[in-house]
Image (cartoon, helix red, strand yellow):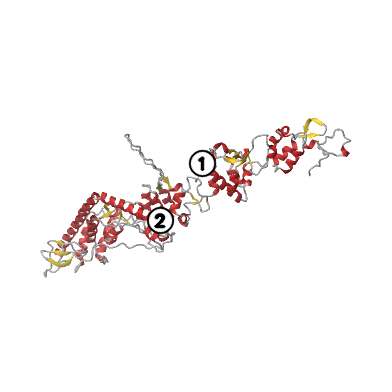
Amino acid sequence: SFSPTPGSGRIFIGFRTSQTTGFGVHLAAPLMPTVEREAIDFVDPALREFNSSLLEVAGILMRLALEHEMNRIGMLWEENAEERKQWEISREEEKRKQKEKDESNTKSGGNAAAASSGAKDTDNDNDSIAGSLFGFASYMARGFKSTVVEAIKTVPEILGEDDETTELLNPRDDRPLSMEERDAIVLMKAFCARPSTPDDLVGQYLAKGFSRCLPSQTPPVLTMDGVVRGKDARLCHHGLEAFGVPNVVRRVVHENAKEYHSMVAGCPRLNINDLIMSLREQVLEEAMLIRFLKWWPKFCRIDNGVERFGIRLKEAVRYQTNSENASPKKQTEKEEEPEVVQVNRLESILYYTDRKFPDGLPLPETTFSPSLQKRIGQRTLENNFYRDWWSVLPFEIWTSFIVYHSCMTKGLYPENTIRRMSIVAISKHFDSLERKGRYLELLAPIKDSPFLPCDTDGTDSNTTTALKCPSELYLASSDLSAFEGCGDFHKVAKSLTKEGVSEEFLLAMGVRKTISMDFLFGHLDTLKWNENPKPLINYLLNADLSRQDLLKLRSTCYLPAENDRSSLYAPSDLYLKNDELKIFPFVKFLQWNSSEGMPS
């Protein structure tokens, strides 16, 4: 036929001979045949030199024809780029609609380990071009037998234990082959050599000439970015091609011309170094970041040894998250300002939250956002291959962050809900600790800040004025009825107790259970306890006094002496009534109604 199948091209010397070229290319040339005119003469030394040189020249012309045709295909590929782009856009829209439909019907299953094993990743980029072409000549002489039986083959998949694993390792690529790709496949298959028959010297001389032409450049191939040299192209490998690495050969194109890509063009397959270099030059969208994080553990399981590249890979990743609340900008006559996109670095992410962490709390910038973490999946983040990437957010780290957050330092009304949730979370964690001293040190920055909501007039207020410092508040359970009229007393909001904030935590933060000694001593006259100490003594007996309160009680002068209205005395200066001590005029007795018993 005019377009022979691979390896079936014939030699013409004025007429068709039975000699094949070993390529999918016919060759018509003034070659010198044997006397029987059935074969090319390689016996006679002179004719052998003539015929071999002529065949090498033919091989050179074949290489030049390949270069010319691939260049034409490359130009057509660039011209039709917009058409392929529109197809990709429509396909993404279909995928989005299908995903929404699937999510509304069923929830996707969990991740499963990949079962298949692949070959180890090797870096063959340093192989010489001359070596590649020499390998092609050897391959021509060796007699590689083709298994390609149809024009366009389907692409075999690396199967995983679930659909997600299979798709991650075999990125979906259902775009129909374009005319340029079909032409490139036919062309590349034509140059997939077979042993020439009946004389294999014909094919060897053609391959030699093919290799001598442009020896410093590998033959061209068609990639998703256009036509490039074989050494600059990359073959798909276990899903690496999904992350924007340039000059990747489509799997369907590679599968239909494997021999050309591996033996003729010498294309290396994708490796981790290619991925790292590519990631440094781009910013991943959120969906691609999620795919990347789900893909990496599965890739590590089937490609041993790549785990050591993990930290370098994490350092290379930059990404942007979806701006769900972005509002469309109004068009004005003035030039619109460019939209500022926040770019995040994956290396700055050190933590994720576990399932026990309360929802809705603010998180440090070094932690995955709840929405992104939910889309990635808890099982993915907990995977053992990420043990050096991040860990569960320690509550102490979160506490160090929240004590400087505006909800705890500024007392803004819109942050009331977040503030209450944070206080409840801190209190519950405090109660769960056996040793609380170290944790209280982390809370020191807010001990003097007005962050605790209080009850005013017996009800909860939602204004910023209802926030007080711990030292200005009393427990909701404190009985302060004896001091009515002596001033305003603010108690911690009862709703906090209902939400789980413990009194132990509030006391540790500085909230008071009893009246301060300074306030008490300053209002003895108002309370009329300076002449009759019984109500004072009864209150102190029932009060929960601190060590500092007891020291003040022992050293302060606040008790009246019997038959002495001139001054007050400290407890150590007075004696309880005792008839045996009345003989000493210098002894001062505590003023106490004799008809009333002394409390024990």
In the image, taking residue 66 as reference, residue 596 lies left or right, namely right
Q: Residue 404: in sight, yes or no?
A: no
Whether residue 272 appears in this view of the structure is: yes
Circle nearer the N terminus (2, 1): 2
**In contact (CB < 8 Å): disc 2 and disc 1:** no
Whole-percent x and y of residue 281?
A: 36, 47
**SS at badge 2:** helix
The alpha-carbon separation of the residues under discs 2 and 1 comes to: 33 Å
Q: Which of 304 and 123 is in front in this view?
A: 304
Total numbered labels placed on residues in the image: 2
Q: Which amino acid does label 1 sit on?
A: Glu
Element under disc 1: helix
Q: Quadrant of residue 240?
A: bottom left
Q: Residue flagged by tag 2: what amino acid is it?
A: Ser
Q: Residue 415 carries which label?
A: 1
Q: Where is residue 174 in the image (x, y as percent from the top left)?
A: 30, 57
- Residue 444: x and y, percent? 59, 41
Could you tell me residue 446's position as x and y percent? 57, 40
Residue 305 figure quarter = bottom left
Give the quarter of the image for residue 183: bottom left
Q: Name the residue tied to disc 2.
A: 104
- In this view, the residue farthest toward the bottom is 36
Vertical arrangement, residue 144 with respect to residue 377, above or below: below
Q: How crowded is mark 2: few (under 14 residues within 10 Å), some or many (20 or more)?
A: few
Instruction: Tell me the residue at 89%/35% (across/down).
Output: 583
Q: Residues within 10 Å of mark 1 (few under 14, many from 20)?
A: some
Tell which tag, 2 or 1, sits nearer the viewer.
Answer: 2
Which numbered disc covers residue 397?
none
